[in-house]
Image: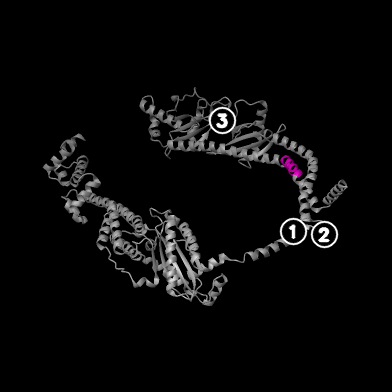
Amino acid sequence: MLERMADLYKKRARSSSVHSVFFRKSLIIVLLITCLPTTFIGFSLYFVGVNRIESEVNKTHQLRLTQISRQLEDQLTQLEVRLSQWAFNPMFNDRLKTMDFAQEVDFTRDMLKTMLILQETNPLISEVYLYIHDSKTLISSSNGVTAIRENELKNYDEFSELMRTQKSIFWTKSIPLPGITDNPVHQKDFMYSLVHKLPGDVSEKYGALMVRLDKSKISSYSHELNDAGVSFLVDEEGDLLIQENQLTEEKTVLKNTLQSEIQKRLSDRKQDTFLYKFQGTTYSVSYYTLSRLGSEWIFATSSDLSTISGPVIMMSRLIISISMAGILTAFVLSWFASHRIYQPIARLIGAITGDKSDKGIVNGDELKYIEKEWHALSRESHVLQTKVEEQLPTLREGFMLQLVQGRLYYLEEEELRSRIAYYGWETEDQQYTVIALQLIGLSSAEGKFKEDDEQLVTFAAANIVNELTQLHMQQAYVINFQDLFVGIVIGLPSAVPANEIKKEMGRLSQEIISTLSSILKVQVTVCIGQLSTELGRISDLMEEARHTLRYRKLLEANQIIDMDSLFLSGDFTFHYPFEIEKELIHAIRLGQEEDAFRIAEEFIAELNHNAGVELYLQQAMAQLVGNVNNALLQAGFNVYHFHQGQNLYEEISQLRQTAEMLRWFKHSIISPYVSEMNQTYQAHQTQTVEKVVRLIEERYMTDLSLEECADLLGLNSSSLSKTFKQIKGINYVDYVTKVRIDASKKLLLETDLKISEIAERVGYQHSWFNRVFKKSEGVTPSQYRDNHH
């Protein structure tokens, strides 16, 4: 019985899956996924890959040819420029026309050295020649001086024809230089030679400077491009300049065929890449035209494409074969995979429908049915989620922050009460107050935190204060201002007397101070605000409390300030330390940093002793900064560029402790000001000494004393003497003597003036001049003149 039920279930499942839309779609998708990519890749590689490879090979081949051709072209250009520069060398002047090189041995040796240097300037140079037309002389960098005779060199008249050429610099292959033959295979040197007629200017030419190239060096460029093909260099007349030393018969025929094909294409394009079939093999052929001073050389190379595309074609055919064989296997596997994919869908449909009928399934599409049921469940879930999230703590926090900051000023009192009642506060017969807490001593020695931990400390303090407040108050909200300041808004029944409220606020404040000091190791100042029955005055009460915190006494670590009794008691007399301020400004102006630090410490200590109140200390520091700036401005220093937009007085208002103020004053005021003062003073000293030097150089022939210089510059002679010695290294008198002696030596050598006249011109009497000169130079003026003539 059970076996029959299992067989019936399997038949129903099999028939339902076959007629299922999802099953058919999944089967088609699996078939496409398994079969199409492999087949597509195979055919793409076969039909597209080969052409693409040929195209990329052509591009790469052309790029390599262009790069190597340009390297060769750059070398040749450099050679042409360097030869043009050497043509203007004074060594190659007109005297070479009549020079007897056999007699002028030293000059001839220098000439050969110069030619060897020219030969070494470019790696392509094989040898350098100098031809003198009138004397029929040929000078070689390696063979020396040779007289040209008609019976020794062929084409004797070609040297005369060379001198009749109108061009000053050109390439030629008609010069019968030693080593150049008609056979480009066996000759060592390059067929073309570079000629520059001498001299380099427009005057009459008397000879020529010729450079012969090393064929092996030029051939090295073509060897880099020889990929199972041939490479060669020909000129526009078809003469072969470079080719491989040993070519097979097949490559020789290929070279001749390609040379003819390239000659046909030159009229249309100076450089190109094309495919050329030769004896059943496809070659990628590229050529590049090098224009050299009226001559054109064609650099050509070829590569066999079969060596690159052959493996790709074989692999493409193999992939196609494997793909076709795998289609059948993929079809079978896809059938079973589709059944496995459909099983979770069938179980999900069963779980959703339950006891329901299958009327919800539209045309056998299970996914549409699941989507419809999912949307229905989502709507129900959303309704429930909305009911759960009706409590809005985030909105309450935002409302309280705006209330304290005064951003709800446009709302009437009734509307404010209505909104705060929405967040759970009682508003009937209520009065309100605030407590402001300032955390101080964050970077003290016993503290746990650093200066940049303000937000962390404030966050921790706000959490602690919130827990303590909830224990004492029914309606209270703690606000974290993120800047070591925490505010508390408290709502109390109007029936509670004011004195009891103050007592309760005092106990709460004392407990907050004790807890925060114990846990966070910070100092706490608490200000208890005034009472009000209007919610709209909360922002004013908080602002007044924050301002009142600045009246805290500096000598007390933790303190509670009650705004109602602040101005009824306390002595806030204040004595400003003017004398210490004068000493501090004087030390800064003199650039004495250590003294300025010490006096600043005395100033802060005096303020702490006399003022005792944070607000007064901040105002005194602002006064000090203003007076320092004023003194330096009067001295001609721009103090504002040090701070780059800093608001010094705003920074002072954020300082809570004397140690912070002292550290800030040293770092932001003393150090940058003293550094600028020292730099400016050094520059000023140098400028003053330079002015004195100019006066000495202009008036050394007169009796210019140090005191006179000081009067002219408006300086003290003693300080000027010290400054001059410090900058120049010698005293004023010795420097004037040095200037006068140098001037007299110049007159002794360049003029025929008498010694007495020279003495008068440099500001000495004749007898005194002789003694001073001999003391300085070791000889008398007359002896000095005789020794140097």
Determine the CA span between mark 3 and mark 2: 89 Å
Camera-side residue: 332 or 424? 424
Residue at 45 percent across and 24 percent down: it is 143
Q: The C terminus appears in which quarter of the rendering?
A: top left
Separation of disc 1 and disc 3 at Cα? 76 Å
Determine if the magenta segment contains residue 741.
no
- For marks 1 and 2 on the same chain, the one whose residue lies earlier in the sequence: 2
Helix, strand or loop under label 3: helix
Residue type pointed to by label 3: Ser
Which of the pair 436/591 is nearer the observer?
A: 436
Sequence order check, earlier mark of 1 and 3: 3
Drawn side of residue 204 relative to residue 358, left or right: left
- According to the picture, the residue beneath numbered tag 2 turns out to be 357
Q: Are marks 1 and 3 in contact (CB under 8 Å)?
A: no
From the image, give the main secondary structure of the stretch colored magenta.
helix
Indicate yes or no whether the magenta region holds residue 41. Answer: yes
The answer to whether the residues at label 1 and label 2 have Cβ atoms under 8 Å apart is no
Place of residue 75 in the rendered image (x, y in percent of width and height, measured from the top left):
51, 36
Q: Which residues are magenta?
A: 34-47
Residue in view at x 37 percent, y 62 percent: 652
Which of marks 2 and 3 precedes in the sequence? 3
Instruction: Categorize mark 2 by other alpha carbons within 10 Å: few (<14), some (14-19), many (20+).
Output: few
Image mark for residue 371: 1
Residue 457 showing in the rendered view: yes
Residue annotated with mark 3: 219
Helix, strand or loop at mark 1? helix
> Closer to us: mark 3 or mark 2?
2
Q: Is residue 789 visible?
A: no
Relative vertical location of residue 465 with respect to residue 681 in this rendering, above or below: below
**Pair 1/3: label in front:** 1
Residue type highlighted by circle 2: Ser
